[in-house]
Image (cartoon, rainbow, N blue to C red):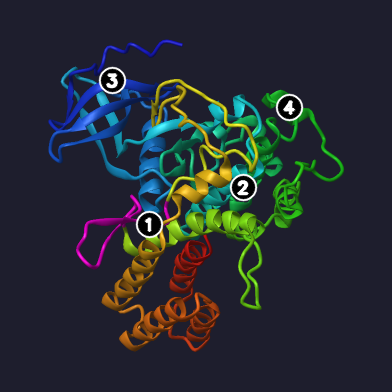
Amino acid sequence: MSPPDPVGLRAGDVLTRRYLLLERIAWGGMSVIWRAFDQSLQRMVAVKLLDGELGVDHGERELIRREARATARLIHPDAIEVYDYGETVTSHGRLAAYVVMRLLEGRPLSDRIIEGPLPWAEAALIAARLATVLAAAHERGIVHRDVTADNVLLTSTGAKLLDFGIAAFIGEDGDDRASDYGTPPYVAPERLTGTVADPASDVYALGVLLFEMLTGNPPYPERTWEEIENVRREGPPPTADVPGMPVQISALCQVCLSHRPELRPKAQEVADGLAEALTPPRSTGGGTLTRWSMVTATATALLVGGLAWSQLTGHPDGQVADPQGRGTLPSAALDLATTFPEPGATPSPSSSPSAPAIGKGGGQKAEQTPWTEAVRSSVPNLNQSLRSFNALLAKGEDEGRIRPDVALDLRQVLANSVRDSGDLTSIWGKIADRNREGSLPDDFRRALEAQLLLVSVALTG
């Protein structure tokens, strides 16, 4: 399909004397998304632009304004960032409403699913990351309402949730029907009756997406509004049966697809359940992890630790300063979600050029390596893992999150454990004790445990 050719803005035009429009990278019924250059801050951006005739507005400007406000309220490393919003009369005498966003490179998840089902561990990791974004949105009162494979971008830093264009606030009256806004296979049954905006509808869509990643197809065959409105579903939702996959993942997927919204879990419960399913139980007797346990544990640590680190430090790119002044260290926010097949799987070559964040084109897939090898090669070595753990403690001290004596205690217990025996049982217990006594906040405890897991893997590997 060719991009629209309106009589309004074109490549080379400058919006509000600031944004130099370079090329159209996506388009839809209401708007065009441009790759643009922010001449004030000297950076590339994506500009979503609604360009229409003066005096003509059928509610589109209100939608794009709502999208900007909803997305700006959500601060999360796996959601697209909004930099600016405005309305202006262009040099062509037309009214333009625009949203300026971070420009990301990657490929839509829908393109990846066309190639076939994803390995179950990869699918679960992607779903867990998306669940954390939705949990953050729901906590801020936002319902996305269009969680689909087209609106998930696989980037070099993991899966990102895009397009809050039809987002609504929790409890907002749903005068519109789902057929006006939404994508048929992902729409929860209750939305067909125009109910108020509810986080449970996002959880249903996440269940559809997880099922689709695991099997290659959505859970129900209906793909048009007419088919969906005419069907009357009875019996339990289908299950995604994948050989070797933990039953907990299949059960979580099925309960997300419950016909009744009150039976679905919260988004954060889905994230926690998937992380638990991917994390092996730690030995309580001081024994070492098995090779497979190390790999799956590391994958989850990279997922959870990366999110925790970026949220605590405010650094979305996953690079942390070395406290000893030797540049930057890789944090746990490494990309595991886009390229790793299951253990033992044969790597498959792929091609096609990288597409912009908002575009619909295909994206470059890195040459794939076996899942275990790829994870192992992404794990920081022991010195890096220890420095990252200590840097996190220093950050907590600087921000007043933990007392200096607590940080010193944890730092010394870890150093002694590594030097004397390599057995980290004492530091695991110390972190738990400090959390129970109220000296270590829950989110900081989780971030420390994720970093400590990487230390454990480095020791045993």
Q: Nearer the viewer, mark 3 or mark 2?
A: 2
**Magenta part of the chain:** 315-333
Residue drawn at (58%, 47%) of the image? 127
Q: Is residue 291 above or below residue 430?
A: above
Q: Which residue is mark 3?
A: 23
Q: Residue at x 44, y 27 (%)?
A: 364
Pick whichever, 344 or 120, lies toward us: 344
Residue 124 is tagged as: 2
Does label 4 or label 2 sit earlier along the sequence? 2
The answer to whether one can see residue 270 in this image is: no
Task: Return the residue at label 1.
Answer: 331
The one of 428 and 167 positioned closer to us in this rendering: 428
Q: Earlier in the sequence, mark 4 or mark 3?
A: 3
> How far is the residue under mark 4 from the one under mark 1?
43 Å
Left or right: 198, with 67 as reference point: right
Q: Is residue 353 left or right of residue 15?
A: right
In the structure shown, which secondary structural element does the residue marked by tag 3 occupy? strand
Comparing marks 4 and 1, which lies closer to the viewer? 1
